[in-house]
Structures are given as structure tokens and as C-alpha cells.
Amino acid sequence: MKLSKTLLIVFTSLCIPISAKQYEPSVKEQVGADINKQVLCIAKNIYYEAAKESHEGKLAVAQVTINRANSKRYPSDFCGVVYQKTGATCQFSWTCENVNPVKDSYAWEECLYIAKRALTESVLHRELAKTKAMFYHAVYVNPGWTNIRVVKKIGNHIFYTKG
């Protein structure tokens, strides 16, 4: 009995940190966590901006996000691009709204697939990559933008590049 109590005390003491220093994840764990975070940010952006659009429409939204992340005028990571605000204005309107949870699991899976590709491929939509399109809006919106030119209309979105 005494031996089992001793083992229990030793085992318990191994589970308690010796110092106040917190567990620090390895570089591999940190990178993995950030990759998952980036995938979720771009997948959510594709889903909430274009879930009901065609595959090309989803690729186009992803490409705009990639183009912005590759530009010096925007944050250099997908989460920074997606959640960027200019004053009180959100770059992507859904980030300032209370959005519903994912309802269309098929569309969500497609968005996740595209988001994973976005981490390893800089070109998902050739025309929007070539023109460095960084703006779009729904066809029923008139943002009053000037000094930019239309690149392409895809589904219910119009994509633009700087003049």
C-alpha cells in the first residue's frame, strides 16, 4: 500500500509543472494552428460571400483575398485581409454582421477545399490573378467606386482592379 501511495505521489507530481513557465507549443504545432486558422478565415470569407455562387465564383472571391494578401496595401495574411477594417467599415460586410452558422454542408466543404488550395497556390482564377483584381461587390449594390475598372462579372458579383 505504501508503494502505491508513493507511486501516486510521484505520478501526480510529474503532472504538475515544476515552474510557473507555461507549456510552449513546438514550432510545428504553432505553424499547424496558424495554417488551420488561415484556412478557416478564407473558407468563411468564401462561404459568406459566395456560398450560392458557382465554383468559379468561389474561386474568384478566394483570388481577391489572395491578391490582397499579396499586396503591400493590405495585411499579409488571409485572416488579416478578411477581418480588416477601415475605420468602422469592414472590408467584407459579413465580418461586421451576425452571420448564421453554416447551413449548406456541401458548399462549406467546397469552400474549405478552395481555402486549402489558396494556401499553396497563388493563382486560383487566372484572369483575376493577372489583373490583380482586389475589389468586388454584388450586382444589386452600387458602392459608387471611382478610379477602378471592371474586370469581369461572375454570377452575382462584379470584380474590379485599380484604374
Image: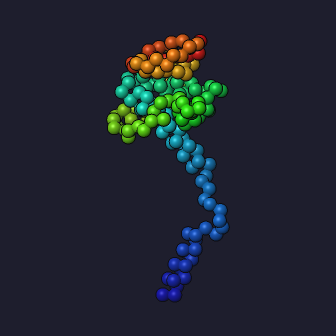
User: Which residue is located at x 62 percent, y 32 percent?
Assistant: 76
User: Which residue is located at x 47 percent, y 30 percent?
Assistant: 93
Work out which residue is located at the far front of the displayed protein and give it: 88
Picture quadrant where residue 110 is located: top left
Residue 45, position as x, y percentages in the image: 47, 32
Picture quadrant where residue 101 is located: top left
Residue 75, position as x, y percentages in the image: 61, 32
In the displayed structure, does residue 113 sit left or right of residue 73? left
Residue 73, position as x, y percentages in the image: 64, 26
| Residue 123 visible from this viewpoint | no
Between 17 and 103, the residue placed more toward the observer is 103
User: What is the quadrant of the C terminus in the image?
Assistant: top right
Work out which residue is located at the far bottom of the displayed protein and give it: 2
Picture quadrant where residue 138 is located: top left
User: Which residue is located at x 58 percent, y 26 percent?
Assistant: 68
User: Which residue is located at x 54 percent, y 30 percent?
Assistant: 89
Residue 83, position as x, y percentages in the image: 54, 35
| Residue 106 visible from this viewpoint | yes
The type of colouring in the image is rainbow
Name above or below for residue 48 compared with residue 56: below
Count of numbered tags:
0
Between 89 and 3, the residue placed more toward the observer is 89
Between 15 and 141, the residue placed more toward the observer is 141
